[in-house]
Image: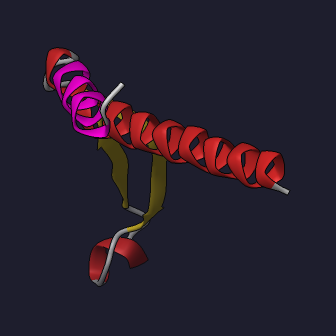
Amino acid sequence: MDDLKVVGAITSAAAATGTGSVTIATITSSAPGILGVLGFTTTTTVALPVAGVVAVVGLITLGVCKGVEIARQQSESQ
């Protein structure tokens, strides 16, 4: 399959996943300033967009497949 078609398919799959997000971590720490002294906390959520995760995984997989293909061609030529 042509590389541009594969990248297009990955882009289409990423777009089809929607605009949701995946929560990676929730971090709780003391609030800054006087509120922290009084015992208040603040929570930060680390999230990644699903479309980005799908695109990155697809492109990494494409890179691994291309690397295996190149290695196989080099071993056959020796």
Magenta highlight range: 3-13
Q: Quadrant of residue 20?
A: top left
Q: Main secondary structure of the magenta part?
A: helix
Q: How many marks?
A: 0
75 horizontally vs 28: left or right: right
Residue 40 location in percent, x, y? 37, 61
Residue drawn at point x = 68 percent, y = 43 percent: 68
31 horizontally vs 39: left or right: left
From this view, report whether residue 47 is shown above or below residue 43. Answer: above
Residue drawn at point x = 23 percent, y = 28 percent: 5
Q: Nearer the viewer, residue 65 or 44?
A: 65
Residue 61 among those drawn in magenta: no
10 horizontally vs 57: left or right: left
Q: Quadrant of residue 32?
A: bottom left
8 horizontally vs 75: left or right: left
From this view, report whether residue 19 is shown above or below residue 74. Answer: above
Residue 19 location in percent, x, y? 14, 26
Q: Quadrant of residue 54?
A: top left
Residue 27 location in percent, x, y? 47, 54
Quarter of the image with the N terminus is top left
The outermost residue toward the bottom is 33
Residue drawn at point x = 80 percent, y = 45 percent: 76
Residue 22 location in percent, x, y? 37, 31
Q: Nearer the viewer, residue 40 or 69?
A: 69
Q: Nearer the viewer, residue 15 or 47?
A: 15
Q: Nearer the viewer, residue 78 or 30?
A: 78
Residue drawn at point x = 63 percent, y = 41 percent: 69
Quarter of the image with the C terminus is bottom right
